[in-house]
Amino acid sequence: MQEILAEYRRLLGGIDDWYAGCIERSGGQIVCRPGCSGCCRGLFEISLLDAALLQSGFAELAESVKEQVLVNARLRVNDLQQRWPEFQAPYILNPLPNDEWQNMPENDLTPCPLLGADGNCLVYQSRPLTCRLHGLPNIDCSGESFSDDWCTLNFVGSNPLHRAELRYPFRDAFAREFELLGLFAQQLTGRRQLELDTFVPSGLLINFSTDF
């Protein structure tokens, strides 16, 4: 599985390079930076592959920091289990009704358990794909839109959807992501599965050695 994670990191590196290039070419219209943590609130789904990536970064933290992160993660998962008693290890969301977990409250301002007191991500180099994409529209080089949302702090007073310099081969990138997720699931569960989602707090609690 380490080979798959290494390949996934390479894929994410391409996304990071794209984002950095967008910032450089934006003329100051993109304010997203490490430490800008307004979007690091609430709950949003991540893949099981992202959860494994998160845990690799989490493993490098100081023990005292890990303890506090796990306290916050467990509190969050306990709250979710009040809502969904069946949400138990390995904390996979997909068996639950889609409309319940894919539309979490937007006014939830609870910080991510991996958000440091200074507003920086504690595992920035191991953050999930969705965190790396947030803030900019995801428009493929072909013009196909995978997400037409962007942070309201970016491109104030203008619409970035038709800016060619913001485009990226997202279709190929997402296809590769699904391919790697399928390989990861095959090794982990014995079945090639593409719908294995969790949340960041629950992803930190998954035991990849015993939960599958």
Image (cartoon, rainbow, N blue to C red):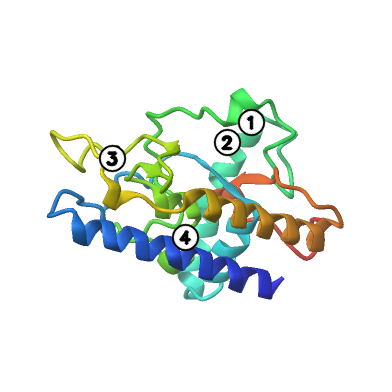
Q: Are marks 1 and 2 in contact (CB under 8 Å)?
A: yes
The image quarter in which residue 195 lies: top right
30 sits to left or right of 115: left
Tell me the number on the disc at residue 79. 2
**Disc 2 versus disc 3: distance between alpha carbons?**
28 Å
**Label 1 to label 3, Cα distance in Å?**
32 Å
Q: Residue at x 18, y 41 (%)?
A: 155
How far apart in space, not on screen, are marks 3 and 4 (Cα)? 18 Å
Q: Amino acid at mark 2?
A: Asp
Q: Nearer the viewer, mark 4 or mark 1?
A: 4
Q: Circle 4 sits on which residue?
A: 127
Can you tell which mark lies on residue 52?
none
Question: Residue drawn 41% across and 55% down?
Answer: 132
Tell me, yes or no, whether the two marked residues, 2 and 3, touch with CB atoms within 8 Å.
no
Question: Which mark is in front, 3 or 4?
Answer: 3
Which residue is denoted by mark 1 in the rendering?
82
The residue located at (56%, 72%) in the rendering is 59
Residue at the outermost front position: 142
- Identify which amino acid the numbered label 1 is placed on: Gln
Residue in the foreground of this view, choosing between 160 and 181: 160
